[in-house]
């Protein structure tokens, strides 16, 4: 077997193991949450018997380790369980499966993440490469300063600034563009409208993550510019731009890709504040709501999806860094 | 190549009163101070001098290039009628790689690890639109063949890490040749290679340079090498020309005192002393890194007390691995190490402080072997405090004594390594080793990174300390001249095995085992005809390495 494939399989196995440990941590943290779903739904007036019966119905009376194994066993079979909410004491079970709650929200979040990534990743690579090319110039300093400011501002602040300029003051109105301040998209909207409504949150996310990726691209390339093979390339008469893009960049992928993966993960798991500001129906909001109502199956499902996203993206970054290393790709 | 008929040839490169500045410590210093240089078409000029003499700076200036942190200040550089001084980089790039090419010191670092050799070889030729990609590839394969590379049809498909250092250096020569430049700058092209590999590369370079009548500037610090390659030799020191003459005249009648001192350096030779009882015995040691293949095969080496045993061999022969086994950094899979007749614990962690104290190490690169944030006082004081538990005023007194032993004074106590010269740094490392009061010191290529004059000082110091303190040295080196200078006994290693061992006089006199003969025959001599003689005698297999 090619060493790359065996490495990937090994990493994949390690990733699953990590996910398993994370699931234990998730379950224990949810256990440690104060309060109880039964009490919070039935209210203080409920008798102890009612609460106990309700707990029994939800399976909350079993010992923690048993509930953990029931949960993780079901997850392994692809069943995320049933939400607690909707099982009000009325006797009519209107609860929904967790999958039905999570999947539409996850789709929305991924839509926004992909939209932000499609803008941010090429943008930061271009900015990083050009900043390295014209390093210490006015351009380089401006790009650095601008991205540093955008990463230093809290994301909700960036979001409100964008709303202020593009939705309230309507600075683009002369061009016929007024972005909506609410990004309340739904699945049945046409793609164009969804893109338009998601523009401001996507722009906010872009501003937040560009700095990190751009600065790493710039640093990784500049770090290589002192290498003898870069000097050699210059002395072969190759233009500065080609030296950077053709000779430096292919050797700089490993650190850049790691930072990109880190930021893409943020786009999925760290966007809750931006979602709240724009009332965007994403998975972050779903999780916050579920925590406040003690809807344990939903909380656990969201947390597990976040963990899997992190692990998967980092795995992908590892694979790309390995594949960009000719020593591993072409062994002696 | 040593025939000099430059008088009736056209001038290719004319440098006049060149000044180059380098930026350090927040100000500009002059590195090249008014050097003149004339090179005719098809002529090879040898540029020699110690590190810091400005050889590489001058070589690159011949291309109109200054490294970052340097600037071409004044003077003129005329290449084939064009003034490079003040020329725009865009215009200079049209010359680079096509009419003037560069061959760098470390081929392993100068090839882009991400691309196949062929793509890098033909890059210049294709870029300048002088030939199509297919023609360039065909031509490159012919060059690979002319340079005696193995499998010339397919070697271009490999990545840099897939071929050896000697092969890479020849591929780089092919790369420089591919657009048939008028001038090639060779910047120490064989310095990083083993001697047996060096001969092949020298022969290959000389062959193609003659074949295409290319002019060259050949930069090196090795006189014997430059004697084989150059028509004219120019000696550089502190950015100034000391002397310039035809190769034969320069070798037989050097005039400048500095040139004479360079010529005289390699003259120390230790008179071997009688054998004593063994302080260290390496017994039938076999060792490997991790689960890899064995790097040492059944190696046995004895080190007598107060004597020097030199371990010679090429890179990859297992010299340094043997040292790692002795120090306990690499436990052997079989065999043992005896110290004063008693077996040492194989692992470092199993050894007592006293056992650790008795074996000390000095490394090749003094730069990286010292913590740059520690002062000399701390560097030398640390083993004193650790092994001998001295502190305060007594510690200072001991450090001062040690500094005196290595011929430095107490004023060096408060300096950082960055404020010392290369030779002084290595002296501090020696002081650190003897501060522990060891019985055995392992010297791993301790003079390889130093200039020849500085090397001589370090070797003399080591000999003096051995006499005073009765220390035994296990001296690892690839340099035969150093072996002659320091050793009582010699161990020749090849591919993890001991080929030959014995007292110096026996090793250096025939009959030789095959490998020892190859090794000795590969050491360049100060005779301009040496390379021809070696090649004629057919002692060295040219397609090797």
Image (spheres, coloured by chain):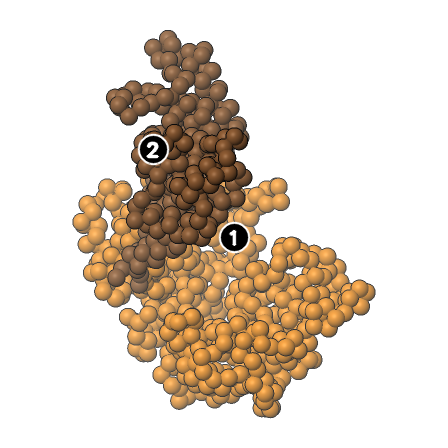
Chain colours: A brown, B orange
On the rendered image, what quadrant is the C terminus of chain B found in? Answer: bottom left
Residue that label 2 marks: A93
Q: Residue at x 29, y 56 (%)?
A: A5
Residue that label 1 marks: B54
Q: Secondary structure at mark 2?
A: loop
Whether A8 is drawn above or below A245: the answer is: below
Q: Give the image quarter of residue A115.
A: top left
Q: Position of residue B369 (x, y in %)?
A: 58, 63
On the rendered image, what quadrant is the N terminus of chain B found in? Answer: bottom left
Q: Secondary structure at mark 1?
A: loop
- Residues flagged by tags 2 and 1 on a common chain: no
Q: Give the residue at the far top of this rendering.
A: A174
Q: Give the image quarter of residue A295.
A: top left
Q: Chain of mark 1?
A: B
Q: Position of residue A327 (x, y in %)?
A: 34, 57
Q: CA distance from mark 2 to mark 1?
A: 87 Å
Instruction: Give the side of residue B44 with respect to residue B143, left or right.
Output: right
Q: Residue at x 61, y 41 (%)?
A: B27
């Amino acid at each position: 077997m090619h060493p790359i494939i065996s490495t990937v399989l090994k990493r994949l196995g390690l990733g699953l193991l990590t996910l398993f440990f994370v699931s234990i941590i998730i379950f224990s943290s949810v256990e440690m949450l104060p309060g109880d779903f039964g009490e919070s739904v039935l209210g203080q007036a409920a008798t102890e018997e009612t609460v106990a019966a309700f707990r029994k119905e939800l399976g909350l009376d079993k010992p923690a380790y048993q509930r953990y194994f029931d949960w993780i066993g079901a997850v392994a079979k692809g069943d995320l369980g049933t939400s607690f909410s909707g099982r009000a004491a009325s006797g009519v079970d209107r609860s929904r499966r967790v999958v039905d709650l999570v999947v539409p929200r996850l789709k929305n979040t991924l839509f926004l993440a992909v939209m932000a990534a499609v803008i941010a990743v090429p943008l930061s690579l271009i900015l990083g490469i050009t900043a390295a090319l014209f390093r210490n110039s006015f351009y380089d300093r401006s790009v650095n300063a601008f991205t540093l400011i955008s990463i230093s501002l809290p994301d909700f602040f960036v979001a409100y600034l964008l709303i202020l300029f593009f939705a309230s003051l309507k600075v683009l109105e002369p061009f016929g563009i007024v972005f909506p301040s609410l990004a309340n998209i739904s699945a049945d909207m046409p793609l164009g409208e969804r893109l338009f409504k998601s523009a401001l949150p996507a722009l906010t996310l872009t501003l937040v993550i560009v700095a990190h990726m751009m600065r790493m691209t710039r640093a990784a390339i500049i770090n290589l510019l002192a290498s003898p093979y870069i000097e050699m390339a210059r002395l072969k008469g190759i233009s500065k731009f080609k030296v950077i893009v053709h000779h430096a960049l292919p050797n700089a992928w490993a650190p850049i890709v790691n930072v990109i993966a880190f930021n893409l993960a943020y786009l999925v798991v760290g966007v809750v504040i931006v979602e709240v500001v724009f009332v965007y129906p994403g998975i972050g909001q779903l999780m916050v709501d579920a925590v406040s109502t003690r809807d344990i199956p939903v909380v656990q499902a969201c947390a597990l999806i976040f963990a899997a996203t992190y692990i998967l993206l980092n795995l992908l970054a590892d694979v790309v860094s390995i594949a960009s290393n000719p020593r591993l790709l072409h062994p002696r | 190549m040593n025939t000099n008929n430059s008088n009736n040839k056209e001038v290719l490169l004319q440098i006049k009163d060149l000044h180059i500045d380098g930026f350090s410590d927040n100000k500009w210093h002059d590195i090249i101070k008014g050097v003149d240089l004339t090179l005719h078409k098809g002529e090879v000029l040898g540029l020699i001098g110690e590190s810091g003499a400005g050889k590489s700076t001058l070589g690159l200036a011949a291309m109109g290039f200054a490294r970052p942190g340097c600037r071409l200040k004044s003077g003129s550089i005329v290449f084939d009628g064009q003034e490079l001084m003040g020329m725009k980089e865009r215009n200079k790039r049209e010359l680079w790689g096509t009419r003037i090419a560069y061959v760098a010191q470390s081929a392993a670092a100068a090839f882009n690890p991400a691309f196949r050799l062929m793509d890098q070889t033909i890059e210049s030729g294709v870029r300048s639109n002088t030939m199509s990609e297919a023609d360039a590839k065909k031509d490159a394969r012919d060059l690979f063949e002319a340079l005696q590379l193995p499998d010339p049809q397919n070697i271009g498909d490999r990545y840099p890490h897939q071929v050896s250092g000697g092969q890479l250096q020849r591929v780089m020569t092919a790369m420089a040749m591919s657009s048939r430049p008028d001038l090639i700058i060779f910047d120490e092209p064989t310095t990083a290679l083993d001697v047996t590999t060096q001969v092949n590369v020298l022969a290959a370079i000389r062959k193609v340079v003659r074949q295409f009548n290319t002019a060259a500037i050949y930069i090196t610090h090795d006189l014997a090498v430059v004697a084989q390659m150059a028509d004219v030799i120019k000696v550089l020191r502190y950015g100034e020309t000391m002397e310039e003459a035809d190769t034969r005249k320069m070798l037989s009648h050097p005039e400048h005192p500095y040139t004479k001192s360079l010529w005289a350096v390699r003259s120390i030779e230790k008179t071997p002393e009688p054998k004593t009882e063994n302080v260290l015995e390496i017994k039938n040691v076999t060792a490997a890194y991790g689960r890899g293949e064995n790097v040492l095969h059944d190696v046995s080496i004895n080190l007598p007390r107060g004597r020097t045993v030199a371990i010679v061999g090429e890179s990859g022969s297992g010299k340094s691995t043997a040292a790692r086994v002795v120090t306990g950094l690499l436990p052997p899979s079989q065999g043992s190490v005896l110290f004063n007749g008693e077996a040492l614990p194989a692992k470092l962690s199993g050894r007592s402080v006293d056992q650790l104290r008795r074996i000390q190490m000095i490394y090749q690169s003094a730069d990286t072997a010292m913590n740059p944030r520690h002062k000399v006082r701390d560097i030398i004081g640390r083993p004193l405090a650790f092994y001998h538990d001295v502190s305060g005023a007594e510690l200072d007194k001991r450090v001062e004594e040690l500094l005196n032993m290595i011929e430095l004074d107490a004023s060096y106590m408060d300096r950082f390594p960055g404020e010392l010269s290369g030779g002084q740094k290595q002296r501090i490392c020696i002081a650190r080793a003897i501060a522990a009061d060891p019985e055995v010191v392992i010297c791993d290529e301790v003079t390889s990174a130093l200039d020849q004059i500085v090397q001589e000082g370090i070797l003399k110091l080591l000999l003096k300390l051995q006499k005073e303190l009765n220390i035994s040295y296990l001296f690892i080196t690839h340099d035969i001249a150093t072996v002659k200078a320091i050793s009582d006994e010699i161990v020749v290693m090849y591919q993890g095995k001991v080929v030959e061992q014995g007292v110096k006089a026996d090793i250096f006199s025939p009959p030789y085992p095959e490998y020892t003969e190859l090794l000795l025959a590969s050491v360049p001599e100060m005779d301009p005809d040496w390379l021809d003689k070696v090649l004629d005698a057919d002692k060295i297999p040219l397609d090797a390495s």
